[in-house]
Image: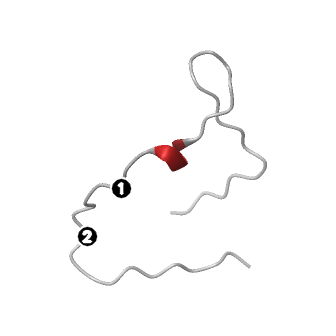
C-alpha cells in the first residue's frame, strides 16, 4: 500500500521547520538496488 502526502510540513518540538539535511547518512541495510518510481 502506498500513501501520497501532499503539502505536509514537518516541524520540530519547538514548531520550527524540521531539516534533516544536516544529519549524517547512515547505512540503510538494503540488500539490493533501490528503485525510485515517480507517482503519476
Q: SS of the residue at dot 2?
A: loop
Picture residue at 59% right of the left edge, 40% below the top:
19
Q: Position of residue 22 (x, y in %)?
A: 49, 45
Name the residue tied to disc 1. Answer: 25
Q: Position of residue 24 (x, y in %)?
A: 37, 50
In primary-sequence order, the first of circles 1 and 2 is 1
Picture residue at 68% right of the left edge, 32% below the top:
17
Can you say which quadrant of the picture contains the C terminus? bottom right
Separation of residues labelled 1 and 2 (CA atoms): 14 Å
Q: Position of residue 7 (x, y in %)?
A: 78, 48
Task: State the mark number for residue 3.
Answer: none
- Given residues 1 and 28, the one toward you in this image is 28
Badge 1 vs badge 2, beta-carbon distance below 8 Å: no
- Given residues 28 and 26, the one toward you in this image is 26
Name the residue tied to disc 2. Answer: 30
Find the residue positioned furthest to the top. Answer: 14
Report the coloring of the rendering: secondary structure
Q: Is residue 33 left or right of residue 21?
A: left
Q: Is residue 34 left or right of residue 6?
A: left
Q: Position of residue 34 (x, y in %)?
A: 38, 79
Camera-near label (1 vs 2) is: 1
Q: Is residue 30 above or below residue 7?
A: below
Q: Is residue 37 left or right of residue 9?
A: left
Amino acid at each position: 500500500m502506498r500513501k501520497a502526502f501532499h503539502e505536509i510540513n514537518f516541524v520540530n518540538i519547538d514548531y520550527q521547520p524540521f531539516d534533516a539535511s544536516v544529519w549524517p547518512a547512515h547505512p540503510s541495510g538494503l540488500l539490493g538496488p533501490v528503485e525510485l518510481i515517480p507517482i503519476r
